[in-house]
Image: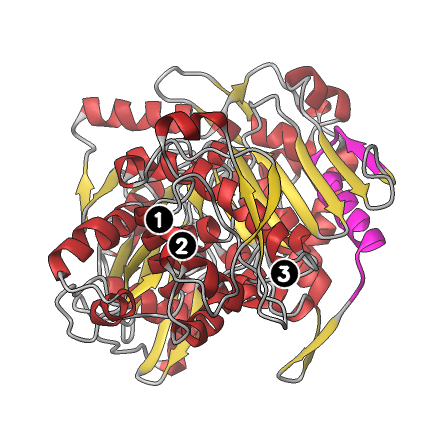
Amino acid sequence: MTQEDIRNIIKKGEGNRIEFKTAENSVPESFYKTVVSFSNTDGGTILLGVSDYGAVLGINEEITVNLQKDIISTLNSRDCINPPLYIQPAIVRLAEGTIMVIQVQASSQVHDHAGKIYIREFEIDIDISGNQVRVSELYLRKRNFFSEGQIYPHVRLSDFDQKLFEKARNLIRNFRSDHPWLLPDNEQMLRDSILWKKDFSTGQEGYTLAAVLIFGKDQTIQSILPAYKVEAIVRIRDKDRWDDRITLRTNLIDTYLELKKFINKHLPEKFYMESDQRIDLRDKIFREVIGNVIVHREYTNPLSTDLIISESEVLFTNPNRPLFHGPIDPVGFNPYPKNPNIRKFFTAFGWTDEIGSGIRNTNKYLPLYINGAKPLFIENDTFKTEIPLVFVTLADYAVYLTNWLGLPLSAEEQLNKGLKNVPLPSNLSGKNWEEVLLHLVPSWHKNGTQLLKESWPDNQYFTKKKKIQVPSRAKKSTQSVRKGAKHIVENIADNQGDIINRIKKVPSWDEKGTKLIQKKVLYLISVLALTAEPSRLSELMSIFDYKNEKSFRDKYILPLRQTGFINLTNPSIPTDPENKYVITEKGKAFLGGLLNYSDHLTMNAEH
């Protein structure tokens, strides 16, 4: 976790998933209570060395190593926390002082501290031990939410592949030689890692689905999950079928290793010097991506996990139990474990770091592997991870977009600067403006009418294109785009100032007199594009020569904010005079035509 990550957490303040504790020379008494409440609820982050009000007080630098060891050993003691938790505290040094970061994952088990069960509500750790109704509800929620914790009472130790235990120990030993899972025998190792558990609400006990997936023989896995499979495909030369393909129905350890081997076979290496360390960017990126795909899959879903490599991108699709719908913002997202016990093993192997690291590290290293590229993570019933292998942005077409939207030429510089952060689908690389626009407009219509509902005019249809001739750019007024009754005009100026115009037309236009692009839609698209570079309300209004602030805010700013496409640069203090409007990750994905309607079917309901 970086210094910037820590400062963002401190800025948010304490809450349901954030806790600050002073700890200059020792662990505070309330620390373990908070660890249990986080693990029993939604997980969270504890910062030791920070006051309740967010002031960095620091911890004694001389005791940091001993403090780490004490926390690890105590969390693994059943006398303190039962069942034990394996958590690795991290040290982060800020200018104001050294702090310790403890990331607690939501557990599939119910944990207690000194015999008491705690849950987290707002900023408080609540003891529910004496409330049998709430305790029963907690057990039920754990059993239902984490499918990895489903118990199979008739699975025996003989149903596991004994060679996998030694493979797992070697992987753990190579990453961390003093890990507590290295010492016990196979059965005790499964119990210590909570891959064997007892459901206290039903009395059922046995090995879990997570245990079968990590250590099970292939026939054991296929007997329990007959539809489970992972497919990796290369489609570069033969786009209708495939150039190379593997299908995996095996344990998660070998699945990870085979997928990494497949990636290494088909994607090039690229190295980067970070400080004095030589980093394999391919390994750094796909170690995290493949680890996250395996860790976060919903294994009770019969759909397959797919990896598709094309000449323009690497696409992962994964069955998922979504917590929301839409693109993940790498800065503001709250990571949430889908299979915490599987993740523990992958972290012990060194294949994943702390929760949320996959998205952060991919965003950090991908622009170095593919110059400027940004990954796209979309949370939905099928989780999508898109890794572009070529990078194209809307800034490449800023001059055409300025003209097409009818904006003054003075806006071109702002668009050219801001739209460098708005990626287009990688398969549009090398396409001309006409082809790009013919992708963007249908995408805006299809998603706009669903995501912005009443704020986005309906009946904006389109079919195939034809050409007409119109005057040059110099003679064309901006109103020719906004007032055309039956046409969408796509303007492209060549060196002579001529414009090739393409239109799409349907019969109902003649009957309804509607336009493909209405004035309100143009304004919404324009505001979204302009906020790719943070802009004040007054600056946006001046570009449109708009005088009524309330009308502009209500018609254009409010719908885009409600849908989550733009936000304030300082949303915690809306009255900050320095506030500007800036596009969000959702807004970038929408503007760049990266959204699919199916990915965002319920987004509007959440806003």
Q: In this view, does 169 lie above or below 603?
A: below
Q: Is disc 3 placed on a helix, strand or loop?
A: loop
Q: Is the magenta stretch mostly helix, strand or loop?
A: helix
**Disc 1 vs disc 2: Cβ atoms closer than 8 Å?**
yes
Task: Compare marks 1 and 3 and give the one earlier in the sequence.
Answer: 3
Label 1 CA crowd tier, 10 Å (few <14, some 14–19, many 20+)? few
Quarter that holds the C terminus: top left
Coordinates of residue 433 in the picture (x, y in percent): 60, 57
Q: Is disc 2 placed on a helix, strand or loop?
A: helix
Q: Which mark is residue 506?
A: none
Q: Can residue 348 be seen in this view?
A: no
Q: Which residue in the protein does label 3 denote?
A: 176
Foreground disc of the pair 3, 2: 2
Q: In this view, does 430 lie above or below 83?
A: below
Q: Which mark is residue 483?
A: 1
Mark 1 → mark 2, Cα distance in angstroms:
6 Å
Q: Does the magenta stretch include residue 264?
A: yes
Label 2 CA crowd tier, 10 Å (few <14, some 14–19, many 20+)? some
Q: In which quarter of the image is residue 305?
A: top right
Q: Is disc 1 placed on a helix, strand or loop?
A: loop
Q: In which quarter of the image is residue 453?
A: top left
Q: Residue at x 46, y 42 (%)?
A: 487
**Three-letter code, disc 3:** Arg
Coordinates of residue 529 in the picture (x, y in percent): 40, 61
Q: Which residue is drawn at 35% across and 85% down?
A: 95
Coordinates of residue 378 in the picture (x, y in percent): 50, 44
Q: Which residues make up the magenta segment?
A: 245-269
Mark 3 → mark 2, Cα distance in angstroms:
67 Å
Q: Residue at x 61, y 53 (%)?
A: 434
Q: Which residue in the protein does label 2 denote?
A: 480
Say which of 100 and 274 sits in front: 274
